Image (cartoon, rainbow, N blue to C red):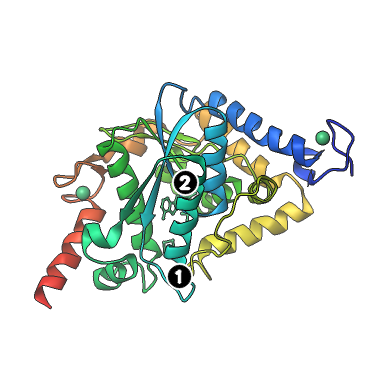
Amino acid sequence: MKCKKCGEKASVNMRQHKLALCKEHYLEWVPEQTERFIKKYEMFTHEEKILVAVSGGKDSLALWDILHRLGYQADGLYLGLGIDGGINYSHESQRLAQKFADERGLKLHVVDIEKEYGQPIPVLSEISHRGHGKPCAVCGLVKRHEMNRIARDLGYAVLATGHNLDDEAAVLFGNTLNWSSEYLLRQGPVLPSADGLARKVKPLCRFYEREMTAYCLLRGIEYIYEECPFAEGSTSIYYKELLNQLETARPGAKLTFYLKFLEARKRGDLFIEQNVGQAHLHPCPKCGQPTSAPGLCSFCRTIEKTQQLSLSE
Ligand code: AMP
Ligand code: FES
Ligand code: ZN
Ligand code: ZN
């Protein structure tokens, strides 16, 4: 296999794009494509301050690297979740995120959930009785809430996450299986800012997971290989496996699934937008973030519950 640009030996072969590239041209191609997506979906400009949520995994570190190379003003945010799982998951991922920042002289904000709210994620999950014994539901809730809060408190216009095509296709698949119209209407590369929340963007949403792995390996970015120990057996991993089977038989199927969805949504083919979506949202009386729950938002209710329980112990 030869590089399409220079004819040298290719390092990465992307069947879905009918494109093979050598190391040098691959490392050029990924940022070029990212810049194209940033412009196409009007994610942000060079004048805006961007907060990149970095987990220490390959996608978010690749994203930070790419935005930095493209000359964007991007700082990092690491949330310490307090997840051990026998592999010291949080400790190790924080170390790698910090190392990445230090080596490039970039600014990384670190927020520790246990320090902020009294307990690490697994304990918050246990005492709030949410999520059927798995911490992932509470973890997702807390991460979303904290990313929004910190971006707003620190005055960032944009919050960027490392979600890749495999993540987005799996979420889309789940939302489609359930015909969750509210979620479908809000899923996309950009979620506009609302009620004082920063705009949310996913600049890597058109890259396959393996393209990001290749980027980190060829660029020499050290990242945490392990998945979160609680992710094992999750529905989203199951959907990813299903979609990978489809992709093997029909290269490009995952990308088509996602892109055709975005097109249909843009045309207004999906649902009658006025009837769903943001219609029933109001600000949470405690934290001010938009919620559809009557009274406090789910995050504030979870935290209140855990605090009442720890007081009564
Ligand atoms: P996940 O929900 O683990 O698939 O991660 C999706 C995205 O959320 C990552 O690409 C990061 O941008 C962000 N993220 C996940 N975990 C953390 C964390 N502990 N701190 C900051 N950002 C995170
Ligand atoms: Fe949150 Fe796994 S439970 S990252
Ligand atoms: Zn080449
Ligand atoms: Zn709230």
Dividing the picture into quadrants, the one containing residue 6 is: top right
Looking at the picture, tell me which residue is in the foreground, 111 or 18: 111
Bin the neighbour count of mark 1 within 10 Å (Cα to Cα): few under 14, some 14-19, many 20 and up: few
The residue identified by callout 1 is 88
Q: Quadrant of the C terminus?
A: bottom left
Q: Earlier in the sequence, mark 2 or mark 1?
A: 1
Q: Is residue 58 visible?
A: yes
Check disc 2 and give the amino acid type: Asp
Label 2's element?
Answer: helix
Q: Position of residue 95 (x, y in %)?
A: 46, 58
Q: Quadrant of the N terminus?
A: top right
The residue identified by callout 2 is 102
Number of numbered discs visible in the structure rendering: 2
Image height check: is 231 above or below 202? below
Label 1's element?
Answer: loop
Check disc 1 and give the amino acid type: Asn
The single residue placed furthest to the left in the displayed view is: 312
Q: Is residue 305 left or right of residue 264?
A: left
Q: Position of residue 40 (x, y in %)?
A: 56, 24
Mark nearest the camera among 2 and 1 is 2
Q: Is residue 112 left or right of residue 252?
A: left
Q: Is residue 276 visible?
A: no
Q: Position of residue 198 (x, y in %)?
A: 34, 34
Q: Which mark is residue 137?
A: none
Looking at the picture, tell me which residue is in the foreground, 131 or 21: 21
Bin the neighbour count of mark 2 within 10 Å (Cα to Cα): few under 14, some 14-19, many 20 and up: few
Image height check: is 96 above or below 310? above
Residue in the image at 59% along x and 28% along y: 35
Dividing the picture into quadrants, the one containing residue 283 is: top left
